[in-house]
Image (tube, rainbow, N blue to C red):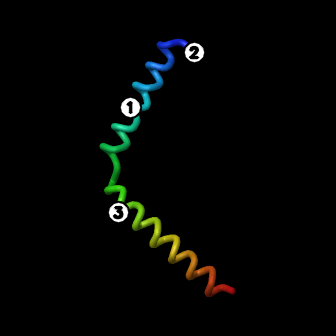
Amino acid sequence: MSIRFILGFVIGFMLGASVALALAPQPGAATRHQLWEKVKERTRQESSIE
């Protein structure tokens, strides 16, 4: 691999991560809490079906 490819990859990764952080709708802790609540809700629904 050439140094230009590696440099381009690193710069692209940093730009992508920066944009993702800037456009995130809510903090990571809130997202994890929301996902965990959905998992618990789905688990309750599945256990009530059986």
Which residue type does callout 2 highlight? Met
The residue that mark 2 highlights is: 1
| Helix, strand or loop under label 3 | helix
Q: Nearer the viewer, residue 5 or 26?
A: 5
To which quarter of the image does residue 33 belong?
A: bottom left
Give the class, few, some or many, for how many residues have Cα within 10 Å of label 2's Cα (few <14, many ≥20). few
The residue that mark 3 highlights is: 30
Q: Nearer the viewer, residue 49 or 29?
A: 29
| Helix, strand or loop under label 1 | helix
Residue at image location 45% in from the left, 20% down from the top? 8
Q: Nearer the viewer, mark 2 or mark 3?
A: 2
* Quadrant in which the N terminus appears: top right
Residue at image location 52% in from the left, 71% down from the top? 39
Q: Which of disc 1 and disc 2 is earlier in sequence?
A: 2
Give the spatial CA distance, label 3 vs label 1.
23 Å
The residue that mark 1 highlights is: 14
Give the class, few, some or many, for how many residues have Cα within 10 Å of label 3's Cα (few <14, many ≥20). few
Residue 2 placement (x, y as % from top left): 53, 12
To which quarter of the image does residue 25 belong?
A: bottom left
Residue at image location 49% in from the left, 20% down from the top? 6
Which residue type does callout 1 highlight? Met
15, above or below 42, in the image: above
Q: Which of disc 1 and disc 3 is earlier in sequence?
A: 1
| Helix, strand or loop under label 2 | loop
Residue 29 placement (x, y as % from top left): 35, 61
Q: Is residue 50 left or right of residue 1?
A: right
Give the spatial CA distance, label 2 vs label 3.
40 Å
Q: Marks 1 and 3: in contact by CB < 8 Å?
A: no
Which residue type does callout 3 highlight? Ala
Q: Nearer the viewer, mark 2 or mark 1?
A: 2
Q: Which of disc 3 and disc 2 is earlier in sequence?
A: 2
